[in-house]
Amino acid sequence: MIDSYKSLIRQGLSKKRYQHSIYVADECKKIAKKYGANVEDAYIAGLLHDAKKDVPPDELKLMVINSNIEAEEIELDTPQLWHAIASCQFARDKLGISNIDILNAIRYHTVARPNMSLLEKIVYLGDISSADRTYNDVGKVRRLIYSNLDSAMLYVLKFVISNLLSHKGQVPSTTIQAYNHYLSVNKAQNLT
């Protein structure tokens, strides 16, 4: 099954994007092993998270509109976020994946949301910390991930929101809600 997924997404992605998907899948597998999550589900969700990233914008927006997947207005106005919904729809409708946790992990890997499942956190963090990522704080993010997922979530959400604000980007409400949620979780665990 995984080999057939690889074959299918390889056809629709650039070489660089396909390699990124492999790196994310590998990282998700490692994080899943560390935290006792389903390793195969983590690998599949990581592999498919960007399955539709290279689809032309007009086609991607149509996929989002026709997906019957709820999206907030900011997501519909932000082309960089469309691929998450389209990739979720592809996994559900074309690949026949019915595991809601895998589908949600793909769906929320860009915007996050409060109270994410273990698999959702793994894919969100696996994407931002994969082997091909080279931004300044990636080493710190990787260390946090293997220390405490909730601390890593808070740190990454602060990083993402700061980046969006510095580029005058809109911040989806689910991202803000996720930040508030993980701030509370970290305070409750005396991690802040």
Image (cartoon, grey):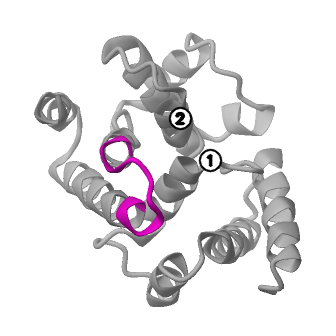
Q: CA distance from mark 1 to mark 2?
A: 7 Å
Residue 65 x, y percent position in the rendering: 61, 15
Residue 189 lies in quadrant = bottom right
Q: Residue at x 31, y 18 (%)?
A: 95
Q: Residue at x 32, y 58 (%)?
A: 29
Residue 18 relative to residue 177: left or right: left
Of helix, strand and loop, which one carries label 2?
helix
Which sits earlier in the primary sequence, circle 1 or circle 2? 2
Q: Is residue 37 magenta?
A: yes
In which quadrant is the C terminus drawn?
A: bottom right
Q: Main secondary structure of the magenta part?
A: helix
Residue 146 relative to residue 154: left or right: left
Residue 191 relative to residue 141: left or right: right
How crowded pointer 1 is (Cα within 10 Å; few <14, some 14-19, many 20+) is rated as few
The dot on residue 101 is 2
In which quadrant is the N terminus drawn?
A: top left
> Are discs 1 and 2 less than 8 Å apart at CB?
yes
Position of residue 37 relative to residue 52, above or below, is: below
Q: Amino acid at mark 1?
A: Ser
The magenta stretch is: 32-41
Residue 128 x, y percent position in the rendering: 47, 66
Outermost residue to the front? 36
Q: What residue is disc 1 on?
A: 117
Of helix, strand and loop, which one carries label 1?
loop
The dot on residue 73 is none
Q: Residue at x 44, y 59 (%)?
A: 36
How crowded pointer 2 is (Cα within 10 Å; few <14, some 14-19, many 20+) is rated as some
Residue 10 x, y percent position in the rendering: 16, 37
Position of residue 7 relative to residue 130, above or below, is: above
Frontmost residue, 1 versus 110: 1
